[in-house]
Amino acid sequence: MNVISAIWFSFLYFPGSVGIVLGVDEITGERKAYIGVRVSGSSEQKDIESIRQFGSPLGLDVLKTIVNFLEKEN
């Protein structure tokens, strides 16, 4: 997967962070996203690679559910 971007979420009172790695499959051209925890913290590139290899796939259906929830008016 060709990594395009990484998004990091840090916590105020908790050590570590969560990352989302965005990329494009080099064979199929499919766009993919993986979510995981930042492991080493010493190298962003190592953390991106760890999430790319071992993170959970973050599918469009999950993202749509989150967006629908946030946009819903009470």
Image (tube, rainbow, N blue to C red):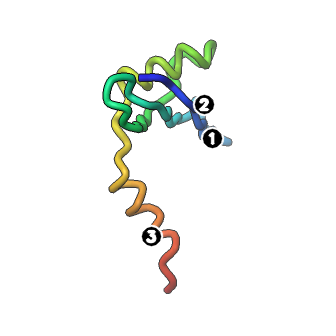
Which of 71 and 41 lies nearest the eye of the viewer?
71
The residue lying at 61 percent from left, 19 percent from top is 44
The residue lying at 44 percent from left, 70 percent from top is 69
- The answer to whether marks 3 and 2 mark residues whose Cβ atoms lie closer than 8 Å is no
Which of 59 and 38 lies nearest the eye of the viewer?
59
The answer for how far apart the CA atoms under marks 3 and 2 are is 28 Å
Question: The N terminus is located in which quarter?
Answer: top left
Q: Is residue 3 left or right of residue 14?
A: left
Q: Quadrant of residue 12?
A: top right
Q: Name the residue under label 1.
A: 11
Question: Could you say whether the residue bearing mark 2 is in a helix, strand or loop?
Answer: loop
Question: Three-letter amino acid code at disc 2?
Answer: Pro
- The answer to whether marks 2 and 1 mark residues whose Cβ atoms lie closer than 8 Å is yes
| Label drawn at residue 15 | 2
Q: Quadrant of residue 9?
A: top right
The answer for how far apart the CA atoms under marks 2 and 1 are is 7 Å
Question: Could you say whether the residue bearing mark 3 is in a helix, strand or loop?
Answer: helix
Q: Is residue 12 left or right of residue 53?
A: right
Alpha-carbon neighbours of circle 2 within 10 Å: few (<14), some, or many (≥20)?
Answer: few
**In the orientation shown, which residue stands out farthest toward the right?**
12
Alpha-carbon neighbours of circle 1 within 10 Å: few (<14), some, or many (≥20)?
Answer: few
Residue 32 in the image: x percent, y percent? 40, 37
The residue lying at 33 percent from left, 56 percent from top is 61
**Which circle's residue, 3 or 1, is located before the other in the chain?**
1
Q: Mark 3 points at which residue?
A: 69
The residue lying at 43 percent from left, 31 percent from top is 24
Residue 54 in the image: x percent, y percent? 35, 23
Numbered circles on residues, count: 3
